[in-house]
Structures are given as structure tokens and as C-alpha cells.
Image: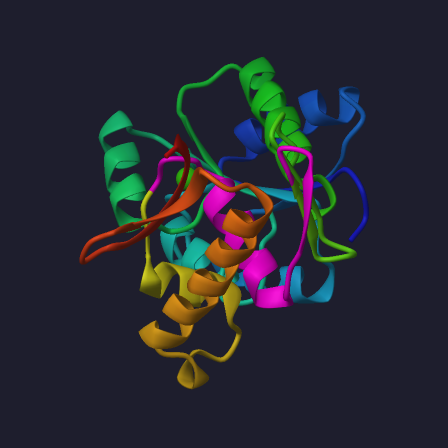
């Protein structure tokens, strides 16, 4: 992955070039695609660092594209939508986008969001005051305690912690973590979560971070017991 390359998927040429100008003057390299059908092949050939993705596109719409991309990549995606009401729909669909921006927007706002999302996802590392995730080693430092995790445990923690308080369903966890869904059942996820929780409670007795939400799934949130 090349650092700082933003793919702009937007079929309004004026808007696309405005975004491109602002991003370039903030130090990003940009590329623009105007046809929805070209996005997936372009990503598979050369993955950018982040994608701005318009919802209404010729060929294939942004929601469909986002869903497809999440089957093979965790690239940060910021959706661009023309209507506020669409944001609710986007959120409800749980497409796995990292952020949403409503049109009309100021290009400056877009640059700020791009920077924020890049920061959050740089190198696949999440860093907050209490949690540092190191993808190259599959280790997490949670409140100063190092956890040695398996790849799956690491990915589960990373995903849950990327959005504290948000409930992820088992299917969402499976979708985002496994490339081949056929080999995974809900029970598999439960057993990985169980092991991950045990590692956390061994390292930090009396504190709980991963909570099961009955009948739905799991969330990350710190609670002192
Ligand atoms: Ca459009």
C-alpha cells in the first residue's frame, strides 16, 4: 500500500477535481474514478490508502461497492452522500464504511476527515490512551499490559475496539475477519472471543472490555467490575 494515496470515486467532474485539488495541496496523491464498475478492478490492482466513495454512481452504486470491498480489504472508506436521510440508511446497512460526509460539503471538511480517518487506521494500528495494537506482532497493549494474541483474536479485538460501544453481530465479525466464510460458524467466533476475554482478564483482573450483548453479538467497552 502506498502512503497517502486517495482514490476519489465521484461522477461529478467538477466536484471530483475540486476534491482532488484540495487533497493534493494537502500533500495527498489522488486518482479519480467516475464509473462505479471500475472501482473494484482498480482496487485489486493497486490499493490506495483511502477511498472517498460517492453513493450515487453510474454502473454500480457506492453501497454495493463498499460491501464488496469489505470482502477483501480493510481500506478506509469515507462515503459521500447527497442526502442527510441517506446517512441513516448507510449506518443501518452496516456497510463497514469508516465515515460519512454529506453533500454539500466544504472541501476543507473533507480533507480534515481524510486526515482523521488516515490517522485512525495508519498501518492498521489503533492507538488510544488505553489500547495500542501492533499488527506486525499481533500484540496488544491494553492499559500497559501486553497481550499475546492469535491472528484471529487480534483481528477481533482490533475490530471491536475500532468503535467502542458499537455492537457487532457475529456475522459482521465473521465477514470482516474471515475471507472464507464457509469455514466459520457463530460458535467459532464465540470460542475465539472467550479466549480473548480470558487473556484480557488474566492481564487485567477486575476489568472487562469485551461484552456480549445477548442475542446480538459483542461490543468493546471498559467496565470496572
Ligand atoms: Ca454522484
- Place residue 169 in its image quadrant: bottom left
Residue in the image at 66% along x and 66% along y: 44
Is 44 left or right of 204, judged from the image as shown? right
Is 214 left or right of 174, judged from the image as shown? left
Q: Nearer the viewer, residue 136 or 195?
A: 195
Report x, y in % for residue 148. 69, 57
Report x, y in % for residue 119. 67, 30
- Place residue 115 in its image quadrant: top right
Q: Nearer the viewer, residue 205 or 139?
A: 205
Report x, y in % for residue 198. 49, 57
Q: Is residue 57 above or below residue 138?
A: above
Q: Quadrant of ligand 1?
A: top left
- Residue 29: tell me if it is visible: yes
Report x, y in % for residue 142. 62, 39
Residue in the image at 70% along x and 26% along y: 23
Residue in the image at 34% along x and 75% along y: 187
Indicate whether residue 4 is drawn in magenta.
Answer: no
Residue in the image at 58% along x and 33% along y: 16
Q: Nearer the viewer, residue 17 or 161?
A: 161
Q: Nearer the viewer, residue 207 or 149?
A: 207
Q: Which residues are magenta?
A: 142-166
Indicate whether residue 146 is drawn in magenta.
Answer: yes
- Residue 35: tell me if it is visible: no
Q: State the count of labels.
A: 0
Q: Is residue 140 above or below residue 190?
A: above
The C terminus: image quadrant: top left
Amino acid at each position: 500500500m502506498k502512503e497517502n494515496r486517495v482514490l476519489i470515486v465521484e461522477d461529478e467532474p467538477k466536484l471530483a477535481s475540486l476534491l482532488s485539488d484540495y487533497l493534493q495541496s494537502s500533500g495527498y496523491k489522488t486518482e479519480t474514478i467516475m464509473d462505479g464498475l471500475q472501482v473494484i478492478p482498480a482496487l485489486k490492482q493497486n490499493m490506495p490508502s483511502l477511498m472517498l466513495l460517492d453513493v450515487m454512481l453510474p454502473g454500480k452504486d457506492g453501497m454495493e461497492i463498499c460491501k464488496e470491498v469489505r470482502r477483501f480489504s480493510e481500506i478506509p472508506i469515507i462515503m459521500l452522500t447527497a442526502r442527510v436521510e441517506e446517512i441513516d440508511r448507510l449506518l443501518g446497512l452496516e456497510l463497514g464504511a469508516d465515515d460519512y460526509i454529506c453533500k454539500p460539503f466544504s472541501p476543507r471538511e473533507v480533507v480534515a476527515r481524510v486526515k482523521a480517518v488516515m490517522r485512525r487506521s495508519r498501518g492498521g494500528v489503533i492507538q488510544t490512551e488505553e489500547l495500542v495494537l501492533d499488527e506486525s506482532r499481533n500484540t496488544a497493549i491494553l492499559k500497559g499490559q501486553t497481550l499475546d494474541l492469535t491472528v484471529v483474536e487480534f483481528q477481533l479485538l482490533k475490530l471491536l475496539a475500532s468503535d467502542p460501544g458499537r455492537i457487532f453481530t457475529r456475522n459482521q465479525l465473521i465477514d470482516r475477519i474471515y475471507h472464507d466464510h464457509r469455514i466459520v460458524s457463530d460458535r467459532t467466533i464465540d470460542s475465539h472471543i472467550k479466549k480473548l476475554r480470558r487473556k484480557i482478564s488474566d492481564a487485567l483482573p477486575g476489568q472487562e472490555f469485551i461484552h456480549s450483548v445477548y442475542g446480538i453479538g459483542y461490543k468493546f467497552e471498559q467496565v470496572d467490575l
